[in-house]
Amino acid sequence: MTKYVVESSHTPEECTKALDEMLEKGEDVLKQFAFACESGEHTGWAYVDADSKKEALGIVPEPLQNKARAHEVRIYSPEEIRAAHEEA
């Protein structure tokens, strides 16, 4: 499994519809997301384990998946970060 940060943006008009679709998948799906809607940034972020980007994006309501992004992430040691920049 790979860790992904899933980023899903939506308009204010899509917000409650997206909420309802997420709740259809179960409250545990909703609990995986942190949202910034109240501050005017209608975006949610989730940290998920998945076998592929496509699988990671499956957490997002289908109508929003075309706008969502999944970023493969991992925790690096300081040595790994330095080595990656030396190779570049």
Image: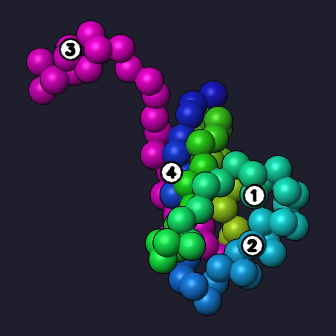
Q: Nearer the viewer, mark 1 or mark 3?
A: 1
Amino acid type, label 2: Leu
Residue 59: percent from left, percent from top? 69, 55
Which amino acid type is shown beneath numbered disc 4?
Ala
Mark 1 vs mark 3, CA separation in Å: 37 Å
Quarter of the image with the C terminus in it? top left
User: Residue 6: horizontal and vertical position, in percent?
Assistant: 55, 52
Q: Is residue 75 magenta?
A: yes
Q: Earlier in the sequence, mark 3 or mark 2?
A: 2
How far apart marks 2 and 4 lie (CA) works out to 19 Å
Q: Identify the residue under disc 1.
A: 30
Asked if the residue at tag 2 contacts the one at tag 1, i.e. Cβ–Cβ closer than 8 Å, the answer is: yes
Q: Which residue is mark 4?
A: 70
The CA span between labels 3 and 2 is: 42 Å
- The mark closer to the camera, 1 or 4, is 1
Q: Secondary structure at mark 1?
A: helix
Callout 1 environment at 10 Å: few (<14), some (14 to 19), or many (20+)? many
Q: Quadrant of residue 23?
A: bottom right
- The disc, 4 or 3, on the residue closer to the chain's N-terminal end is 4
- Disc 1/disc 4 C-alpha distance (Å): 17 Å
Question: Between marks 1 and 2, how big is the CA–CA gap?
Answer: 8 Å
Please indicate, yes or no, whether residue 54 appears anywhere in the rendered image: no
Whole-percent x and y of residue 27?
A: 85, 57
